[in-house]
Amino acid sequence: MLKIYNTLAREKQVFTPIIAGKVSMYVCGMTVYDYCHLGHARVMVAFDMVNRWLRTSGYEVTYVRNITDIDDKIIKRAQENNETIAQLTQRFIDAMDEDSAKLGVVRPTLEPRATEFVDGMITMISLLIDKGYAYAASNGDVFYAVNNFADYGKLSGKSLVDLRAGERVEVDLHKKDAMDFVLWKSAKLGEPSWESPWGKGRPGWHIECSAMSAHYLGQHFDIHGGGQDLQFPHHENEIAQSEAAHSHDGELCQMVNYWMHNGFVRVDDEKMSKSLGNFFTIRTVLEQYDAEVVRFFILRAHYRSPLNYSDQHLDDAKLALTRLYTALRGVETTDEAVDWQLAPAASFKAAMDDDFNTPLAFAVLFDLASELNKTKSAVTGSLLKNLAAVVGLLQRDPDTFLQGEIEQVCQSLDVDALIVQRNLAKQSKNFTEADSIRKTLAEAGIVLEDSPQGTTWRRA
């Protein structure tokens, strides 16, 4: 029985889809004005894991992840680069797809772009005006009137009183209330624009997800996901827009049953982000680490927990993944359906059904690897490989993976130089240093062999 932590309810809840056997899931995607960083990678990989487990559990999943291809940052970057918005966004969409594929992320069912749904956004904004939840300002902007939506703040737990007292809000004399947010922006010179009942302009950011999710998944759907940073104001504003626009006879229409948010990626205890300048792009990280190592690093932490980025943590992930591949080395495995009645498989399933608890699920994989190291059993090896496949891991030839890691280790550690250093330490009777060097190499999958002719090394 799958349980999901619902941010709206602030508790784990048994998952019951609106339509039996089917799941509708929308995840907020990327704003494509730059290369994706590791924070974006976590969103991609975390909800790919969710998508995979839902499918493994027998559900037919419609997974929609949008692309924001028009906003202030995109316009500014295109102007700085002296290129069209279409050229800029397509270049970074292609880069995002490349990064995502390397990380083993299965493409979502649908990937709508904001610019393809402006008409739908205009229709929704018109509905909000007609129902008294939005108003057109004298400057051509359209704003959402948060005072008119009684449930505003229910996702984040923030009240309007607290928000007015504690939030820094940009002053706009055209707003009726400082907390009102923009639905439509009037056209500015040199910016792209669309015709609307309020004059030329372009949509605000929040309205795009309300329009696209409703178009593909309906007014009421199962799961909405995204990064923790989107909980407020973006997802709060989505709820206000969608539930008000789809209201009937004054009764609000519930937008989403289960809200899911993945935790931040942190660097030195600060959230990784472009605005803070402490981000590492996916492609930069992949220059140093194998893509499957990065995927493993992301998934070994629970999706709701903070993920601390450092070379040490990625090195630890590499060693752990190497342990799993080493256990599979030389074992004949078969691709077959997992028998979920088997004790290890049942434990794996119980972990995943408990709000996608990958740390506990991975513990099952390591228990199987330990058993496999002793028995080299094809049955155990097949179960290890096929359970790992559920989360997109351990599907490469072990020797191929291990050879790649050894080559990388040789380049980064300079194995021959370390052997010379170890021999000098032994000659000086500094056996502590000699043992430390052997241990360092052993952890990297390299075994030293001493003989009268000298020291050689091989893969573990």
Image: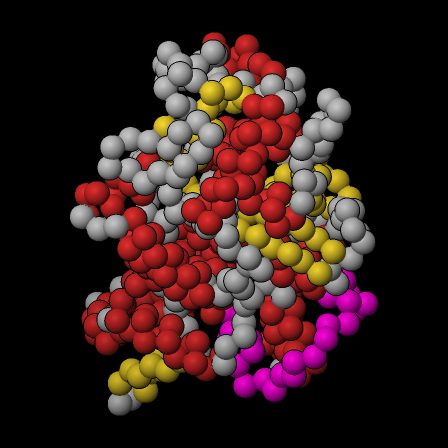
**Residue drawn at 51 percent across, 69 percent down:** 323
> Can see residue 77?
yes
Residue 123 rendering spot, x and y as whole percentages: 55, 36
Task: Say which quarter of the image contains residue 98.
Answer: bottom left
Q: Is residue 340 left or right of residue 160?
A: right
Q: Is residue 422 left or right of residue 182?
A: left
Residue 190 rendering spot, x and y as whole percentages: 24, 37
> Can see residue 239?
no
Span colored in magenta: 323-348
Residue 427 rendering spot, x and y as whole percentages: 22, 72
Q: Is 335 part of what is drawn in magenta?
A: yes
**Residue drawn at 73 percent across, 72 percent down:** 338
- 70 or 413: which is nearer to us? 70
**Residue drawn at 50 percent across, 52 percent down:** 112
Q: Is 273 part of what is drawn in magenta?
A: no
Quarter of the rendering occupied by the C terminus: bottom left
Task: Say which quarter of the image contains residue 391.
Answer: bottom right
- 353 or 187: which is nearer to us? 187
